[in-house]
Amino acid sequence: MTVRKVLLAATVLAVPAMAQAQPVTGLYVGGGAGLNWLTDSDGGNLQSFIDSSSVNATNLGLTPSGNFNASFDLGFAGVVAVGWGFGNGLRMELEGSFRQNDVNAVAARGFTGNSGGFARTYGAMVNVLYDFGTQSNWPVLPYVGLGGGYAIHEYNNVNLRARGTAGTTVPQFRIDDSDGEFAYQAIAGLAVPIRSVPGLALTAEYRFFGTLSPELGATATNANGVVRRSSVEVDNFNHSVLVGVRYNFGQAPRVAPAPAAVAPAPARTFLVFFDWNRADLTGRARQIIAEAAQARSSQSVTRIEVTGHTDTSGSPQYNQGLSVRRANAVAAELVRLGVPRNEITATGVGESQLLVSTPDNTREPQNRRVEIVLR
């Protein structure tokens, strides 16, 4: 299987687990762990310190002059944090951290030998972070942050023991001390929300963490066992790559958008026509009324409006009564066909709403009608 196919399969499997990002709002907790690289530490010029310690390295064929330097193996870093999100991408948090790296080598120019020990840092930080994309529905949230606080940097038995001939007491340089200093850090990361658990996100981030130079107590022991004590300033600059989790309490599942409201079906209208000066139903009129009753059964109808009309022949008073009789005749036929009477409203409007405009005292077949409206 090619690398391209593997990446494609991983993407397909990961998509169901991801959800559109939501801004961190309210209380959250988080943690992460990973690798830590502690840069080489330059302890300054030790010539005067070594000389004052009467470390008789020259007797061993050594020239102890120049700078002390410690290098470290790749180590471990871990952080835990509790914070508050303001819902607009901005977050603040309190963080505790731990870092440890074993010594790879300790050296002073002209002073060679076996070395050992490890360095640790304990930190308490206040961080301010900002999540990008909180208003854009991104599936992944990048974020950046800055932090300040206090850290204790410790050298545990960091030592250099010079090589000597068999049976010869050899000089030793050793640091076993700790010091607290102001600490600072910069953070860049990504958060991937998990759809199945609202508020849960996976995180991956890089951190640069440093302190002001700690001053640590050091001892030098010469070949005769004479011990001298002094202090050495060391460096503490860290590069960490961490993966972790974050949980935002109280996050609700993203609500799916409500479906668009369905527009009500337009009202249907049926026209029933009458002979001049008549209110009885013709065969064609009964057929149209039956079609209206059938339409009422096949669609959602809440009420039926039955309105009687006349033409302009005759007096307005007479036509008003005639229009009411025509409306009642149609309503009665609808009831006979099974339509409940309480769904029907029957009214007459006389000659006030002509379908075809005509002068007074004009016979017009299209104005002699009843309108059935299904709503």
Image (tube, rainbow, N blue to C red):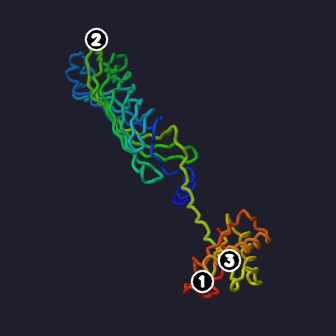
- Return the disc, 1 or 2, that comes first in the chain's sequence: 2
Among the two numbered marks 3 and 1 on one chain, the one whose residue lies closer to the N terminus: 1
Q: Nearer the viewer, mark 3 or mark 2?
A: 3
Instruction: Name the secondary structure under disc 3.
Output: helix
Disc 3: which residue? 322
Q: What kind of residue is marked 1?
A: Thr
The residue at the point 27 percent across, 31 percent down is 42
Residue drawn at x 79%, y 72% as measured from the top left:
337
Q: Do we see residue 163 in this rendering?
A: no
**Quadrant in the picture for the N terminus:** bottom right
Q: Amino acid at mark 3?
A: Leu
Disc 2: which residue: 226
Residue 100 at what x, y percent from top left? 41, 30
Q: From mark 1 to mark 2, how far is it between C-alphas?
A: 134 Å
In screen coordinates, is 192 left or right of 112?
right
Query: Which of these two is toward me, 50 or 35?
Result: 35
Q: Nearer the viewer, residue 270 or 312?
A: 312
